[in-house]
Every structure is written in C-alpha cells, then in structure tokens.
Amino acid sequence: MIAYDHRNMRYLPYKMLSADPIRHQAKILVVDDDDNVRFLTRQCLEAENMIVVEASNGFEAIDVFVRERPDLVFMDVEMPRMTGLEACQRIRELPQGESIPIMIVTGSDDRQSIDQGFEAGATQYRTKPVNWSLLGRDVQYMLRASSAFNSLKRQEDRLRYLAYYDPLTSLPNRRSFNEQLNRLLKRSQRHNTTAALLFIDLDHFKRINDSIGHARGDSLLVEIAKRLTMELREEDAVNYFSESSAADEEIGDGATEIARLGGDEFTVVLSDVSDIADIEKVARRILNSLSEPIALQSHNPVVTPSIGIALYPQDGSDPDTLIRNADTAMYVAKAEGRACFRFYNEDMNSRAFEQLKMEEELRDAMRNHELELRYQPQVDSQSGEVVSMEALVRWKHPTRGMVSPQEFIPVAESTGQIIELGEWVMSEVARHCLYWDTLGLKPFRVCVNISPLQFNQSNLPAWVAEFLEQSGLPPERLELELTESAIMNDAETNIAKLRALKDLGVDLAVDDFGTGYSSLSYLKRFPINTLKIDHSFISDLDTPDGAAIVDAILALAKSLKLRVIAEGIENEYQLEYLVRKGCDLLQGFFFARPIYPEDVPNMLHANFSAEIQEVIGGGIGEERYRR
C-alpha cells in the first residue's frame, strides 16, 4: 500500500510512514538532565502501565528516539549542550518524527516562550512545577489525540492515493499524468528544452484477457508496470509526482515519468532530451523488456507493445496536442506490424483521418450491401479436380470502386468490425452452398478465414454450433482457416477450443503456415486437417531458402498426416515444383482468380489435369528444379 509523504512530497508505502502496530503498552521517551525529574516521571508513567525510556540531553534524546521509536516524547526545554527546543526541531526533521506527539516542559510561562515551543514543533506545552498526579492522564489524552489524528491522516493519504494513483499497478494514473505533463511542459518552455511523450499500448491484450481470464490479465498488467519501472530506473531517474507548482525546480533533470492511463495504455515522459537517439534507446529498451514472456501460473504469454512518440515543442506545444499526436503515432505503429515504435509526423494525421473515414464507410457498407463474396478454387494435384473453394470478401465502394482487402480488413480488425464482418461471410457462404446444392452439384468444402479477434471470442464454438444448426449447412462442407499466430498464443487453452470446433464436424486449417512460431509439440496436439503454405514462400520458390522452407513444411505435414495446400501459385515453375514434391492442393492465379458465386458451378465442372500434366510432362522449369 502507498501513502503520501507530506514532508518530501512523494508517495511511499504506508509501513514507511505509519507508527508501529498498536502496542498494549505505550512507549514514552523522557528527556531531562535532572535525574530526579526523570525518576519521578518514570514512576508516574509506569503506574499508568506505560514503558519508559530515558535520555539525559538533546543529543542522547535523538539517538534514543531513532533506536526506540517511542509513541510520545516528554522533554525538558532547559538542558545543556542542546536545548529541548533544538532537539524537538531535530526530531521533527526525522521521517519517523513527523507526527509523534511531543510534550515540552519549561519554567517559562510567557507568551513568547510558548510560541517558541510550538514553532519548534511541540504538540503540547507544560510549565513547571509539573503536576505529577495529572501527568499520566495528560499523556494518555495526548496519545489518544495522536491516534485519532494519525487515523484521519491515513484516510487522507488513502483518498489522495486513490485520486492520483492506479490501485492495480501503483503507477500514477491519468489525473497524475495530466498534471505532471503540464508541469513538465511549462518547465521545458522556461528552460528551452525538449521533452518526449511515449504512448504505449499492448498488442492484442483483449485476446489475452479473453483467453486466460481477467484475473491473470490484471497480473500481467502488474508485471508490465514493474518491468517499465525497473527498466527505466536502470539509467533514467524515475521521479514520482509531487504537489509542487509549475515553478517548482525540484523536478529532476532528465526525469522519466511513468503512468498508466487505463486498460492496457501506459505513458512515459522523458524531459530535458538532448538527442533523438536517446529517445530511440529508451523505446528499444521498453520493446525488448515488455516483449519477454510473462510467467502466469501455467501460461507464458508474450505481449508486445506498440509505441507512439511525440516531441515537445515540435509535435505539440500543449498537453492535449502532444497526447493526441503520440496516440496517432502509436496507431501507425500498430498498423505497420505492431511491436515497434514510430515518431509522429504531420502525414500521420491525414492517414488517421482516412482510416477513420474508412471505418465509418465500412460500417455503412455492411448496412448498404456493398460487400460481396468471391470464391477461389483449390485444385487436387493428382486428379486436377476442383475440390474446395476459399471464400474471399470484396468491397465494391460506390465512389472508390473496388477497395482492396489489404486496406479495409486491418481497419475492421482494429475496430472490432471484423466480428460482424466474419458473421456476415459465414451467413453468405451458407446461403450460397444451399443454393448450389439445389443444382445437384457435387459436395465440396468452402474455406472461411477466421480472424484472430474472432478466434479469441470465448463463445466461438457455441456460435459456430448455433450457426450450423440454424443455417442447415452440413459441417463437413465448412473448413475454418485460423492464423498460426492466433492458435499458438496461449496454445494450451486453444487446444480445448480447437477440439470443441472439431467435434462439431468442421475441418480446421492453419493459414499462412510458416510465418508464425509454431511449436512442433503443440502442432501434433492441435486437431487440424490442413496446413496452408503462405504465398510469400511460394513466391520465393526459385531461391534456395524459399525452396528449403517449402520442403520442410511438406515433410512436416506428411509426418503429421495433414493435408497441404499452397496458395499464390502464379507460374509453371511453382506448379511443377509443388506437384513433384507431393503438395495435395493447389491455389492461385495460375488456375483462376477469385470468381463470382454464379460462376462456381461451371468452375466445379472444370478439370485442370491436362494443364498439370503438360507442365509435369513438358519438364517446364525442370532444369531449375533439379538445381
């Protein structure tokens, strides 16, 4: 727990500020140079069941105070070497002496002497001669008043903590961040220095939360906060927020401010930056530290950050503009592959506006029936028959024309619209399949891409089961294509989800295989039917590395008794190589571009065995193949 240190204007754990746990006996420090006075005082206080420790002068009093940590100090003013007033001041300067009750005793009863006592830090003032019969009662009263005061102070500290700090991670919250950023920017303006704001967002954090639960998700956020703090403390001074004004010069030079704004968003502010290279160094350290696996009981998820960086004053002269531009740069980092950092530039705003516009237009497109499905055939390499189709979504925009999926699919994924889009695709596939069945066509599989966001929905198996029941689509007609990275993230949990889908009777394929980080031990346990070689490897088949990767995937699939499909086949050399190596299914522009639903019946009657045999028999590209 954290409390506020009023003297040093910073937050500290409560145990550093609060008194020891309540004792059965209060401990009183008696300070007087007169042995008889100390003896009488001890007699009175011990009669009230109190523990008494003694000191004969001011220097000794300070030593005993630090060692014994008493609950109250009873101190004479007139002492040699160091007066009681000086000792009182010294005790108040100690961290544990800030709120300890101090009763000073003196023979002077004039107003000036009393004022001097309170100015030195005394809690109560007694004049000599001491009324020994009432001393125990007076001390008990001061202890009760002190206890009540400390209780109120702890409540105040708790309220202040809740107002300025995130209770989960103990990092400054959004309110603290906004106030401190404003101070730092004003300070940078006065000193004509540069500051940098790093806006950090965790990639796919919702997917982790949904898959391993919110409790473990909270534990992950706590670990992220620890890593940020420890990483930046190694070389950067971490200065927690104070209540000082904008003119306060106690904000350290080159300070690093860390905050959690909420959810999976964190910020780091670097002040007095002299070189852009220093900012890049910090950003890389954050990337490397946060990207390490995090041990959460039986799970070891990897969470990568996307970081947007905006500089003061060139990217914004006020906090709102700086935050907005750093946030924009962060979204650009996500759009460019995640797990990276990007500095803000003015072009980003126009791109952000275009993305927002596309998001709105995509929402309208789903309502206005602007989306269409196309189907690309998958050909059996042995028979030449079309045995399956992949469903591909297309957007026919009223003014832009055909919008590439590479443009609108990332927007749909980042906004969550991919869920609705995926459900629409499934319903259209079912509608088309049921229509084709009325034409007496041979049964064939339709492959539908499932986005990582869809796959991470905990109710996906239940939704697919309900979809199959309501649509009437036979489950054996459907193959769900899942990305390698999606199923490998939290593989243990995903095995159960894949088995639940498999139990429904649908086929499962791993899309873009070879681009992720599959573990062979997990791959053997996944109930999948098909591996789909990514088109990037097919396009590199004429290189030794590309061919070696394809060979390895084909050998792996054969050992696991899995179907293999190669996508992106565009030329005869690629076709010949894959057929000779025993690839089961072939897909690409060499056979056909994606076709309209009404053209599917004719395509199913097509047979590409002649084209395949011509390539194989003619030995086209055979010399390159042998090399």
Image (cartoon, grey):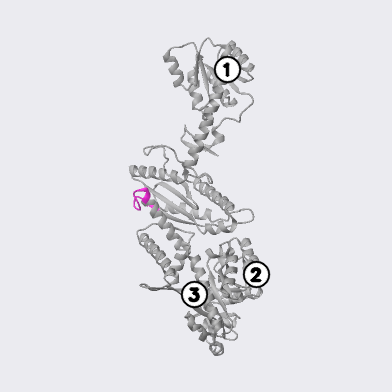
Q: Residues within 10 Å of mark 1 (few under 14, many from 20)?
A: some
Task: Please state the extent of the stretch shown in magenta in the rendering.
Answer: 310-320
Tag of residue 29: none
Residue 472 pos. (x, y %): 58, 75
**Residue 315 counted in the magenta span:** yes
In three-dimensional space, the C-alpha distance between marks 1 and 2, rounded to whole angstroms, equals 79 Å
Q: Residue at x 58, y 57 (%)?
A: 301
In three-dimensional space, the C-alpha distance between marks 2 and 3, rounded to whole angstroms, equals 25 Å
In three-dimensional space, the C-alpha distance between marks 1 and 3, rounded to whole angstroms, equals 87 Å
Pick whichever, 434 or 608, lies toward us. 434
Q: Amino acid at mark 3?
A: Leu
- Lower sequence index among marks 1 and 2: 1
Residue at the outermost top position: 129
Pick whichever, 360 or 353, lies toward us. 360
Q: Secondary structure at mark 1?
A: helix
What residue did someone put label 3 on? 392
Q: Residue at x 42, y 67 (%)?
A: 362
Residue 148 pos. (x, y %): 54, 28
Q: Secondary structure at mark 2?
A: helix
What residue did someone put label 2 on? 503
What residue did someone put label 1 on? 137
Looking at the image, residue 97 sits to the left or right of residue 279; the answer is right
Residue 61 pos. (x, y %): 55, 21
Quarter of the rendering containing residue 131? top right
Pair 2/3: label in front: 2
